[in-house]
């Protein structure tokens, strides 16, 4: 597409020299004609480059040629055409998006208008050909020629963009999946280590030997309810169906046999006897 626009610009400038300037053969050898023609050939030869830096350099070179042409030969239209070509390339290579696209478009229009204003102020060049109307008509012509001649190329390029975007997005997702899986593996490994540590600690949680201390089965039931519910003597009596006086007698006996002074100490001492 970009190369097609470049050839169209060359053709229009040659026609401009032939029909509006008298058609002298030496006029065809001036840089005004050779630059766009050579640049268009270069574009055709390297239009398949994919390196972003090379694409940017390619577009900036075309814009630079256009600016130089507008300064050296504002009478011709090809300087404006190369600014348009450079802008198309920047958009085509997706180097301009969002605010940068608006800024670049404004700068392009400002440069074109500035060239016209400078030429009029100098009063040296015949600017009839570089009127605003003709610029618009020329741009429409160039874009139409490029759209017709390179319609299949443009369609394949758009398909390539869609495929490339899909492939880039898929690769990005694959990379994220690999990162998440690696993170998950680290967490699973850490969980396994913690499970091993927990198992090792639990093996050391041995029940307190109540029978060795002379604790009777009835007193053991009182301790069990106390450990599981951490309740008062009245609640223990209600759960076991005993009288409050009986539970109090058993609790004093438990204190003496275990060598503790409080209910909290009983709970801490026997907490591993019942899971």
Image: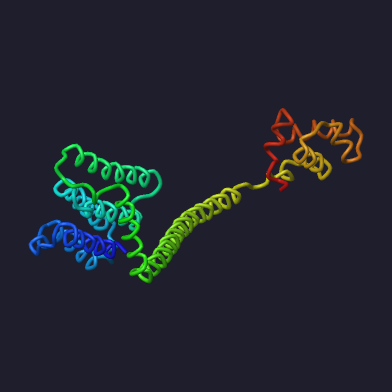
Q: In the shown orientation, is residue 242 left or right of residue 134?
A: right
Name of the residue lying farthest toward the left: 26
Question: Between residues 199 and 88, which one lies in front from this camera angle?
Answer: 88
In the picture shown, does residue 271 fall above or below 141?
above
Instruction: Kindly identify the residue that appears in the image at 78 percent across and 42 percent down.
Output: 224
Q: How many numbered discs?
A: 0
In the picture shown, does residue 42 fall above or below 215?
below
Question: Between residues 3 and 143, which one lies in front from this camera angle?
Answer: 143
Question: Between residues 156 and 252, which one lies in front from this camera angle?
Answer: 156
Figure colour scheme = rainbow
Residue 78 % position (x, y): 22, 55
In the picture shown, does residue 130 fall above or below 227?
below
**Quadrant of the frame with the N terminus:** bottom left
Instruction: Kindly identify the residue that appears in the image at 74 percent across and 35 percent down.
Output: 257
Residue 259 % position (x, y): 70, 32
Q: In the shown orientation, is residue 242 left or right of residue 195?
A: right
Residue 256 % position (x, y): 75, 32
Residue 17 % position (x, y): 16, 59
Name of the residue lying farthest toward the top: 261
Picture quadrant of residue 149: bottom left
């Amino acid at each position: 597409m970009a190369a097609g626009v470049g050839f169209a610009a060359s053709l229009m400038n040659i026609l401009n020299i032939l029909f509006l300037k008298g058609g002298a053969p030496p006029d065809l050898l001036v840089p005004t004609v050779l630059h766009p023609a050579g640049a268009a050939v270069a574009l055709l030869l390297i239009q398949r480059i994919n390196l972003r830096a090379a694409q940017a350099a390619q577009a900036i070179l075309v814009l630079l040629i256009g600016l130089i042409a507008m300064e050296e030969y504002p009478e011709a239209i090809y300087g404006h055409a190369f600014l348009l070509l450079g802008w198309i390339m920047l958009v085509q290579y997706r180097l301009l998006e969002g605010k940068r696209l608006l800024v670049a478009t404004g700068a392009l229009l400002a440069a074109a208008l500035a060239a016209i204003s400078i030429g009029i102020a100098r009063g040296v060049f015949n600017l009839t050909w570089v009127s605003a109307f003709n610029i618009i008509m020329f741009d429409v012509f160039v874009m139409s020629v490029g759209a017709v001649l390179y319609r299949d190329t443009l369609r394949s390029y758009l398909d390539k963009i869609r495929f490339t975007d899909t492939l880039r997005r898929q690769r990005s997702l694959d990379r994220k999946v690999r990162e998440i899986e690696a993170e998950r593996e680290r967490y699973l490994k850490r969980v396994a280590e913690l499970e091993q540590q927990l198992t090792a600690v639990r093996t050391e949680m041995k029940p307190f030997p109540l029978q060795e201390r002379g604790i009777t089965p009835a007193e053991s039931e009182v301790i069990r309810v106390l450990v599981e519910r951490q309740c008062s003597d009245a609640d223990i009596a209600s759960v076991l169906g005993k009288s409050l006086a009986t539970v109090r007698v058993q609790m004093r006996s438990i204190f003496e046999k275990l060598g503790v002074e409080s209910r909290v100490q009983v709970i801490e001492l026997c907490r591993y006897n019942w899971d």
